[in-house]
Every structure is written in structure tokens, then in C-alpha cells.
Amino acid sequence: MAERRASRIGARRRNARKAPSDGYDERRARLIEAAAKVFRDKGFQGASINDVATEFGSDRATLYYYVSNKHELFEMVIADAVQANVKMAEEVRSSEADAATKLRTILVELMRSYDANYPHLFVYLQEDMLRLAGADAEWEARMLDWSRRYFQAVRDVIQQGIDEKLFTSSLPVTITAQGVVGMISWSHHWYKPSGSVSADQIGEGFADMVLRGLVR
């Protein structure tokens, strides 16, 4: 009985995605916002489908018309924003600008994205992606690919600056890149969109600190 019911719900979920009814996209967007708040407050492991349903203002069964499990719901929260940041970093890396301009652009745009997509991206940053993805190989592969591509773009820009004799560092380029990425990623512990310092100011300030340490 339970399997047949789950199958019917799954079929309705797939049909809704293919041909969404009036209000489906709006309700799905509200669900993502509700899930982002719950994951931000409780973390992935601490949050439950019931918690999200309560925040969404529905029951648990209703959520299964939108998602099949908590992993899928988590990916819905973070996927678009994370992929957009990866795309931005790769496009900046491929531009004709010098390495200092590229690195500044990436840092400023990332803080803007964290602000615009709050708390979605902070949900992503505060979780251990490998630990969360362990039960789902396909999801793990996507998480790893996004993280790898984003980090590689930053690393390549720093390497460009070193090759051009614009940057210097006493550390290997990979460790330097890890430091840069870690600095801005740590902002999930303290950044609030309503704070007295804007995302642009923070991004520019981070860029100033990094470039003062790298530029010859």
C-alpha cells in the first residue's frame, strides 16, 4: 500500500514538473525559501522534512509532491546559486583582464551573490558537502564538480598573476588559493544582509587585503 502511494506521488511530482499548474512554480519557490531557513537554522543533519513542512505551512505529505527526499530538497535550495557562481568565476577567468582585476571581480561578485542569495549559499557553505553527499553518489559527484570548478578558477587566476610577475607568494599556489577561498567562505559565520557593512564593501575590502598580500 505504502509503495503504491509513493509511486502515485512520484508520478504526480514528475507530471507537475513537466506541465506545472497555476501556482506550482510560486509554491515551489516558497518551499525553497522555507527549506533554506530551516537548513540555515538547524543544519542539514538536524533538519527534518517535518520541520520544513511546518515552516512551509503544510503537512509532510504535501512536500513529497515537490521533492522525493531531504537530499533533493537541499539541492533545490543551493543548486542555482552555486552553479551561477561557478559560471561567473569561470567567465572571469577567461576574460582579457589582468589577474588582479579578475581576482577582485571574483571576490566582489561572490559577496554580492551571498547577499542576493541569502541564506541559500550560506546553507551550502556551512555544511560538509562530502559528509552530506556520501549516501548519494550522483549528488556527491555534482557537489564535488561544483566545488572543484570554482576552486580551479580562483587558483588559475592566482597562477596567471604569478606567471605574469604581477603576484608573488611564499606559499604554493594551491595553498594560496585555499586561503583566498576560505577567507570569503568563512563569512557564513557572521554575515547578515541587514548589517552595517554592505556586501560590496566587504568584497572590496577582502580584495584589498588579498591583493596587498599578493601584488609585487
Image (cartoon, rainbow, N blue to C red):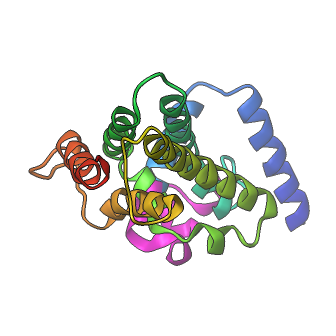
Q: Is residue 94 above or below residue 9?
A: above
Residue 168 x, y percent position in the rendering: 37, 53
Residue lying furthest top in this view?
96
Find residue 173 and report its horizontal and vertical position in percent.
50, 58
In the image, residue 101 sits, relative to residue 70, either above or below, namely above
**Closest to the observer, 109 or 102:** 102
Give the residue furthest to the left: 196
Which picture quadrant has residue 70? bottom right
Residue drawn at x 22%, y 51% as measured from the top left: 212
On the question of residue 123 being in view, the answer is no
Q: Residue at x 22, y 53 (%)?
A: 209
Residue 104 image point, x, y percent:
32, 39
Q: Count the marks.
A: 0
Q: Does the magenta portion include 30?
A: no
Horizontally, residue 20 falls left or right of residue 44, namely right
Q: Overall secondary structure of the magenta stretch? A: helix
Quadrant in the picture for residue 203? top left
Q: Which residues are magenta?
A: 36-63
Q: Nearer the viewer, residue 129 or 161?
A: 161
Asked if one can make out residue 114 in the rendered structure from this viewpoint, the answer is: yes
The residue at 69%/61% (across/down) is 69
The percent position of residue 59, horizontal first and vertical second, equals: 56, 60
Residue depicted at x 45% and y 46%: 162
Which image quadrant: the N terminus? bottom right
Instruction: Check the image and report above or below for 189 versus 144.
Output: below
Q: Is residue 46 magenta?
A: yes
In the image, farthest residue toward the front: 165
